[in-house]
Image (cartoon, helix red, strand yellow):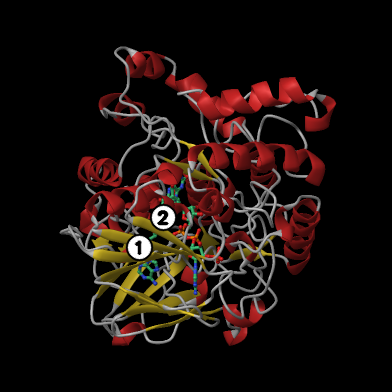
């Protein structure tokens, strides 16, 4: 029972809970379980018709995780961890979705999740000291707390190209792929975009399509996945050491255990450097961090970074037979790692197939989608189907696309007009009793997200329990603590090469979005320690009323 008296509920439908959670991906699912454990009444809202978030929506061919399966999974329940059987190094989207469904069944989550329901606004009521949450079904709920678990990569982005609606063929966005799949057999298919989603799907679309044209604006660096089924005994061995392994992940820099680099790239001679890069490229147990974690200064020193970038360009030139196509596929105008590195199976190799064509949009920009296909400044490409692998309004999109109003009716979009502002990426000054899971200015997208999600969910639910146990009505960051965290983020971000790239980390992929480096690069382990200190010091930096 709550020591805080339930306020009179003035909502139209009379629905009142302790906590509203927005989103039922891995963040929202674990929040529900954890908050229930604290005896709280929780209502989750989810736009989709089932759990899984990212893994529910992104069903394009080839969709899979690029963190090893046994690391990209919950660690909070030892039994769950032991009973679930993964099958291969990098799990496919269907396998991860099966896991999400298993978790939902195991912890009986669905009964408190309202599916097919989009939250449209959350408005703080200064007098009642509660949030009013409105849904697209016209329902009104009130809650003492709102937790946004609405995802960093959940609001997909169509390209700003005129004419899409006029296209006579079918078009698909990778993040809204039909559940029944798409048969491209024999068709003329176009793909716009060459980010992670495109790099995973292009080799598989090429297997079916009669003719495939890839429209590339910016090439990406991709390292080989070396995906494979687990060898006998591997999973059992990992499971025997799971607690130590998980602890290493929590205290690591990226949520993936990795020995720290010992020196700068230019402190090694060319031969030793190459040997390290070769190992990161060829080792079948490699991870996406191996190349960039080879030296201490890969993301802070351009000359160091150039050595790894050139290594990858050499591999592209080796793999791709046509030298012109190879050159077009070589990224040259941003540091490696400053846009998310892709993990690929047969991506570059696919361009050696005679029915696969690459169009360089830097040389011949896209003009429009026509009823028959796609027109560039050079010519029209006739297509039967078009795939948009054009990404997301990342990190802030899910928050700014709903109407969030804090104290005195202040809109979140106004508070964030010059870029996101938060304390620890968890709380926002002027928005009491509100928390964000893996929000901007937390390690989130620069980490194994499962590690960051669990850390946030545990911190947030413990904080809510602390507030409730003490009969506190409101908690929110002080403006000073928020400013100091914003400054700290900018300082650590600006000490790296990240701001030199046009990436979704910088908001550059969305027109009009402030150009600010959004994730926190200080490292998962040090960030966790900071959050623990804040809590241990009675939620230092938060205003408690
Ligand atoms: P999500 O899974 O995005 O869930 C958020 C949910 O909130 C969604 O279901 C959405 O429908 C719902 N929602 C949003 N707004 C509203 C609203 N207003 N009302 C109601 N519901 C709402 N991370 C890794 O660490 N490793 C990977 O290999 C990796 N691969 C990825 C591959 C793809 C294709 C994508 C898109 C992302 C990948 N990520 C990866 C990041 C991935 O998003 C996270 O790992 C994780 O799944 C996020 O979980 P979440 O619950 O925080 O957010
Ligand atoms: O999206 P992206 P994504 N005209 O933004 C192009 C995670 N993820 O869905 O770079 C022409 O990376 C755009 O070009 P440019 C992962 O965190 C992980 O692929 O803006 N092109 C770019 O090439 C990832 O980083 C996996 O010049 C246009 C592409 O579209 C994040 O999700 C798999 C255009 C968008 O790439 C997003 O990945 C999938 C236009 N108007 C996703 N607009 C794993 O492997 C956009 N583009 C685990």
Residue 84, given in percent of the width and then of the height, sits at: 27, 29
Q: Quadrant of the N terminus?
A: bottom left
**Disc 1 target residue:** 175
The response on whether ligand 1 sits within 8 Å of label 1 is yes
Regarding mark 2 in the picture, which secondary structure is present there? Answer: helix
Residue 73, given in percent of the width and then of the height, sits at: 39, 37
Q: Is residue 63 depicted above or below 253 in this figure? A: below
Task: Mark 2 vs mark 1: give the one in front.
Answer: 2
Residue 411, given in percent of the width and then of the height, sits at: 58, 82
Q: Quadrant of residue 75?
A: top left
Q: Is residue 416 depicted above or below 17 in this figure? A: below
**Disc 2 target residue:** 197
Residue 257 shows in the view? no
Residue placed at 74% from the left, 42% from the top?
A: 306
Task: Say which mark, if any, is on residue 189.
Answer: none
The response on whether ligand 2 sits within 8 Å of label 2 is yes
Q: Are marks 2 and 1 in contact (CB under 8 Å)?
A: yes
Pick whichever, 311 or 100, lies toward us: 311
């Amino acid at each position: 029972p709550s020591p805080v008296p339930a306020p009179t509920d003035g909502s139209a439908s009379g629905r009142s809970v302790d906590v509203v959670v927005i989103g039922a991906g891995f963040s929202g699912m674990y929040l529900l379980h954890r908050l229930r454990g604290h005896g709280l009444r929780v209502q989750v809202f989810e736009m989709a018709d089932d759990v899984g978030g990212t893994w529910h929506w992104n069903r394009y061919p080839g969709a899979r995780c690029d963190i090893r399966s046994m690391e990209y999974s919950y660690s909070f329940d030892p039994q769950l961890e032991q009973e679930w059987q993964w099958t291969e190094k990098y799990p496919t989207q269907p396998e991860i979705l099966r896991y999400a469904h298993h978790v939902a069944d195991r912890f009986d989550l669905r009964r408190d999740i309202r599916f097919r329901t989009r939250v449209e606004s959350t408005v703080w009521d200064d007098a009642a000291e509660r949030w009013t949450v409105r849904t697209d079904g016209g329902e009104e709920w009130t809650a003492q707390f709102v937790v946004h678990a609405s995802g960093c990569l959940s609001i997909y982005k169509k390209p700003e190209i005129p004419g899409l609606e006029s296209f006579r063929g079918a078009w698909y966005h990778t993040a809204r792929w039909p559940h029944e799949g798409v048969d491209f057999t024999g068709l003329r298919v176009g793909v716009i975009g060459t980010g992670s989603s495109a790099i995973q799907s292009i080799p598989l679309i090429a297997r079916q399509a009669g003719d495939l044209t890839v429209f590339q604006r910016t090439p990406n660096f991709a390292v080989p996945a070396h995906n494979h089924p687990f060898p006998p005994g591997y999973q059992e061995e990992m499971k025997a050491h799971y607690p130590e392994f998980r602890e290493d992940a929590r205290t690591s820099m990226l949520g993936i255990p990795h020995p720290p680099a010992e020196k700068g790239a230019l402190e090694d001679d060319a031969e030793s450097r190459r040997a390290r890069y070769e190992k990161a490229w060829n080792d079948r147990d490699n991870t996406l961090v191996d190349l960039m974690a080879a030296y201490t200064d890969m993301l802070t020193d351009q000359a160091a970074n150039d050595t790894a970038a050139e290594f990858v360009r050499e591999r592209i030139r080796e793999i791709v037979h046509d030298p012109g196509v190879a050159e077009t596929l070589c990224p040259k105008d941003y540091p490696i790692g400053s846009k998310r590195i892709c993990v690929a199976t047969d991506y570059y190799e696919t361009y050696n197939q005679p029915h696969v064509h690459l169009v360089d949009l830097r040389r011949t920009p896209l003009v429009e989608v026509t009823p028959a296909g796609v027109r560039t400044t050079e010519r029209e490409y006739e297509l039967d189907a078009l795939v948009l692998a054009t990404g997301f309004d990342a990190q802030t999109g899910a928050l700014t696309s709903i109407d969030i109003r804090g104290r005195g009716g202040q809109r979140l979009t106004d508070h964030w007009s010059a870029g996101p502002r938060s304390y620890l990426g968890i709380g926002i000054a002027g928005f009491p009793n509100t928390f964000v899971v893996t929000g901007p200015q937390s390690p989130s997208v620069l980490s194994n997200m499962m590690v960051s999600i669990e850390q946030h969910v545990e911190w947030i639910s413990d904080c809510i329990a602390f507030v409730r146990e003490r009969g506190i009505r409101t908690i929110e960051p002080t403006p000073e603590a928020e400013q100091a965290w914003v400054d700290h983020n900018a300082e650590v971000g600006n000490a790296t090469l990240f701001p030199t790239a046009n990436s979704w980390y910088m908001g550059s992929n969305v027109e009009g979005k402030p150009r600010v480096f959004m994730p926190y690069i200080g490292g998962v382990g040090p960030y966790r320690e900071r959050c623990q200190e804040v809590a241990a010091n009675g939620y230092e930096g938060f205003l408690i009323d």
